[in-house]
Each structure stands twice: as C-alpha cells, then as structure tokens.
Amino acid sequence: MQTERLNRFLAWDPMAGLLTLEAGATLSEVIEFAAPRGFFPRVAPGTRLLSIGGAIAADVHGKNHHHMGSFGSHVSEIELTLASGETVVCSPREDAELFWATVGGMGLTGFIRQASIQLQPIDSVWVSARHYPCANLDEAFRIFEDPLRDDQHTVAWVDALASGPNLGRSVVMAGHHAVRDELPPHVADNALALKPKKERNFPLDLPAWALNPLSVKMFNALYYKTQAAKTAPFVCDIESFFFPLDAIGQWHRLYGKRGFAQFQCLIPRARAHEGVREILERAAKARKASFLSVLKRLGPGNPAPLSFPDDGYTLTLDLPYNDKLPAFLGELTDRLTSYGGRLYLAKDAFATPEQFRIGYPQFDQWLAVKQRVDPEWRIRSALSQRLGMEVGQ
C-alpha cells in the first residue's frame, strides 16, 4: 500500500509542540517543517527517510532511548482504519489496548491514517558532540555506564572484526542539541537554518568479493583512527550526527546485487556485556565482514507488547548476504534467546516462530487485541506468516 501522497500536515500547536499529520508524511518532512521553527522530533532513528506511520508501526528508537524512550511514547493519538473499514481513534487514554498494540504492531492492527506527535524545542540545528575511543568492549561498556560521559544521545560504532584483547574496539559518540553559546559565530546568528541536502547516489553495485574481511578490516582501522581523534567537543550538523548514511543515496549497492541482512538484537542489561561479547566473538571467528556495526544503550520499554526496545543494549550487524548467512544468523539468534534477548521485527528476515515467541513473551496480549479488531486476519504480511503469528487461521 502506497502512502506517499497521504502526507498533509493537519494541525500545529507551537505552544504544546504538538503536530498532527497524515501518516504518509516522512520524518524528513517533519524536520524540514519543525526545525526552522525551533522544534525537532523527540526520537530520531538512524534515517529520516521513513514515514510517520512506519515509525509508529515499528516503534522506532534512536540514540536517546535510555533518556526518552521510543517513538510511540511520544504519540498522543492515532487515527486507524480497521480491516472492517471502520475508522477509530485510539490513544494512551482512549482504547489504550488498541493504541499500544498498534505501536510496534508492524501495521497488523489496521491502516494508520494520521497521528499527533510530540516534538521537543531546540535552540539550533547543530549538535555538540564528543567521541570516546575504546580499545575493547570492556572500555565501551564503562563509557556507556558512566553518567559523567553520558549525553542526550549516545551510540557506539563497533569494529566487528576486531578480536582477542581488541574485541569490541569501538568509538562511543555522545552529543546533544547545541545551545547558541556552544556554536561558532558563523552559525550562531542563523542557528535554526538547515543545511542544503547534498545527497550523492552510490553509482554501481559492487562485486560480491569487494566487501571481504580484508577490505572491511582496512576500512575499520581507518575509520577508528579518524573518529577516535575527535576527543575534544566539536559541533556538527544534525544530518551528520543523526542520519549519516542518508547522505549516500542507494548506499545498499555497496553490498552488491545480493544485498545484505541486518541482525539487530536486544540483550537485557543484566547479561548484555556477556551476550554482546559472545555475538562479537562469533562474528569475528566466522570473519563476517560488517563495516557498519552499532551498539546502543536502551532504557525501560513502554506498554506495547511487540515493541522492541527495553532496558538493555542493542547490537546491530550489517552482513553481506550469501548462502551460508541464514544458518549463521539462526545460530546467533539461538544464542541470543539463551540470554533472554530478542530480534528487532522491523529488520528481521530469518527468525523462526519459536525464536519469535521466546523473544516476545507478551505476544498473546497483542494477539487478543488483533483477534478483537481483525478476527479473520484480513490484514496480514509476509512477516506475520513466517513468524506463525496468525494463530487460529
């Protein structure tokens, strides 16, 4: 179902920072509207190229989940068209069960027509950032858990090919929306002006052999060296900090015609260090060439039964696809569930029904709402079929 034309902005309350809009509007369009007015989404995932309906359905999160929670926690109301054709309104106060089943519900409760989302005030469209180089995973976890080095937004790039004493070598990147006093003079006078977009398309599909352990190891070494040097506070634009990959159109072509699979998992905080270590050890031992590997700290989750984020850590690996990859990811997921973890449904392509049920123990709570609003499962997806969600059908 195409929603790009359902992108009208319907109401704006600058006193409350509340924006009502159709669900096909993108996060990029929200930022272009709100930033010059001194506002920004409370939660920004790794791309601005997603619809607001999609952000709600996947309950996306950003680098600030440990402070602000996920996207759905800042949605005040949803207008939803059910499988029956009836249009209803739900919110945390009105039919809260349907609201929270829709947040993170992967579009399976109905068609999100419009929503009201809460924005936050900002002084500028710039970020005051600082990098912390970490020789290994132990150092990265110490930085994440240190309140003196924490910031509004915190994330780590991880060298997934590092091994031995350097396992988990990484750069923790922390930042916050810069106030005017933190800005250099040449931007302070126009602090809310967005920089013109300079997107460049990656021109071709790389051959399958291009991303190999040696080439990725060389890239990782260079990236670590350049990013680890930024230990002093510096100012960067919001695009560079929040959405670095958006600057490269069709960046997936780096992985060649076979593409890639993303493995993003959550491990509860009590066992996160141990679990992340094992996954990185297995990836390094198998020489899986992930040049985009990210570690984030997450805070407590919300009431949505199928929402991914919860108190713990999330690790992401982007892996070039080959015929052996599904079996490798299956093994990783089995180990993940032994730590009480789960996969992010928005990025999963290989999980089994058993792995899904273990990772999402509140599925029956979500299913009760689904059976109330769509007992015949008129709204279904390849995901719901693969994961065995269509109980009773």
Image (cartoon, helix red, strand yellow):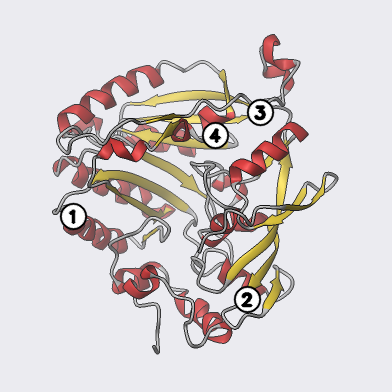
Q: Which amino acid does label 3 sit on?
A: Val
The answer to which of marks 2 and 1 sits earlier in the sequence is 2
Q: Name the residue under label 2.
A: 97
Total of numbered circles in the picture?
4
Label 3 SS: loop
Q: Is residue 149 visible?
A: no
Alpha-carbon distance for marks 3 and 2? 36 Å
Q: Is residue 297 above or below residue 186?
A: below
Q: Nearer the viewer, mark 3 or mark 2?
A: 3
Q: Name the residue under label 3.
A: 125
Q: Name the residue under label 4.
A: 150
Residue 64: x, y in percent? 56, 42
The answer to which of marks 3 and 4 sits earlier in the sequence is 3
Which residue is nearer to you in this view: 66 or 255? Answer: 255
Mark 4 Cα shell of 10 Å, populated few (<14), some (14-19), many (≥20):
some
Residue 309: x, y in percent? 49, 56
Residue at image coords 47%, 35%: 246
Q: Do the residues labelled 2 and 1 touch (CB within 8 Å)?
A: no
- Horizontal side, residue 333 vs residue 156: left or right: left
Q: Do the residues labelled 1 and 3 touch (CB within 8 Å)?
A: no
Q: Nearer the viewer, mark 4 or mark 2?
A: 2
Residue 332's quadrant in the figure? bottom left
Alpha-carbon distance for marks 2 and 1? 37 Å
Q: In this view, does 22 lie above or below 211?
A: below
Mark 1 Cα shell of 10 Å, populated few (<14), some (14-19), many (≥20):
some
Alpha-carbon distance for marks 3 and 4? 20 Å
Residue 97's quadrant in the figure? bottom right
Residue 40's quadrant in the figure? top right
Marker disc for residue 328: 1
The answer to which of marks 3 and 2 sits earlier in the sequence is 2
Residue 296: x, y in percent? 44, 43
